[in-house]
Amino acid sequence: MDGFGSYSGFASVYDALTSDVEYEKRCDYIEAIFQKHMGFAPNLVADLGCGTGSVCSILSSRGYDCIGIDSSDMMLDAASKKAGSEKILYLCQDMCEFELYGTVDAFLCMLDSLNYITDSEDVSEVFRLVHNYLNPGGIFVFDVNTHFKYASVLADNTFVFEENDVFYTWENCFDGEFCDYRLNFFVKDGDAYHRMCEEHSQRYHTHEEILKAIELSSLSLEAVYSELSFDSPHDDDQRLFYVVKKN
C-alpha cells in the first residue's frame, strides 16, 4: 500500500506550501521527455500520486487528456475544485492497486511519490500495473529522492518555515533506508493558529532495486537524468528522473 493516507489534513495547505515547485517548468520538462523518448505524441496521460492535481491541470490546459490517481480523497477534493478539473478524470485509488478502463500513452509519478511506497514488492507491483495499462511505445516518467538528499540534506535535521500564513516545523530521521518525517503545522485563522500534525515515511530506493522492478515488469529503462535536465546524474543530485518504456 502507498503512504498517502495521512495526507487528509495536509491537503488544505499543500498548494500553499508547494508554491515554489514551478509546476509549469516541470510540465515543460515532461513534454520535452515525451518528444525525446516517444515515437508519437501522447494523448492520454495518467498521473500516479497526483495530489491536488497541479500537473494534471497544466497538462490538460495544454491539450492532453489526463487521469489523476491518488489514495487521498481530500487531495482529490482539492484537485476537483481547480479550474478545468471537469476535463480530468480523478480516481481515488492506491497506486499499488489501481484499475483503469483502458490503456494510456504515458504514466507519470512526480515529486518523490514513489518513495512513499516503502515495500519493494509494492514498487514492483506499480511497475507491473503500469506495463499492463501502458500502450506499446508509451513511457513511464517518475522521479525519486537520492541517497544524497536523505543523508546530507534531510538527514536528522529539523527545519522551520513560515510562508503563506502557515508556520511549520519539519523533523527528519533517516536510518540509511527509511526517512521518517514529523510535521507540525500552525495555520493562521484570524488572530489564532490552528495546529495540524502529520507523520510520513519514505524509503530510499537504490538504482539496482529500481532496475529489478523494471525488468520484472518487462519494461525497459530508457534513461536516468538529473532533475529537470538531460544531464547524466551527479553525486550531489537531490532528485533523479527515470524514463521507462514499453517496447
Image (spheres, rainbow, N blue to C red):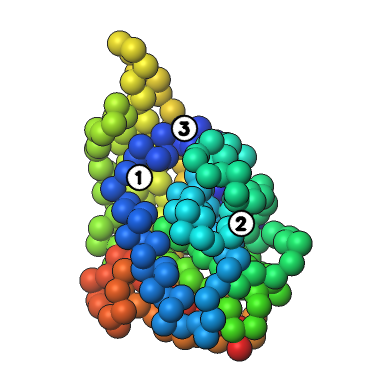
Mark 2–mark 3 contact, CB under 8 Å? no
* Image position of 124 (left or right of 184): right
User: Which residue does the numbered mark 3 point to in the structure image?
Assistant: 12
Q: Nearer the viewer, mark 2 or mark 1?
A: 2
Judge from the rendering whether residue 148 lies leftward or rightward of residue 196; answer left or right. Answer: left
Where is residue 30? Give x, y as percent. 42, 68
Q: Is residue 234 above or below residue 83?
A: below
Please provide percent x and percent y for residue 72. Answer: 59, 43
| 173 and 211: which is toward the camera | 211
In the picture, the disc for residue 177 is none
Would residue 142 appear left or right of 185 to someone viewing this image? right
Q: Which residue is mark 1?
A: 18
Q: Nearer the viewer, residue 93 or 26?
A: 26
* Relative height, residue 28 to residue 60 (above, below): below
Which residue is more in the foreground, 157 or 231?
231
Query: In the rendering, which numbered label is found on residue 67?
Result: 2
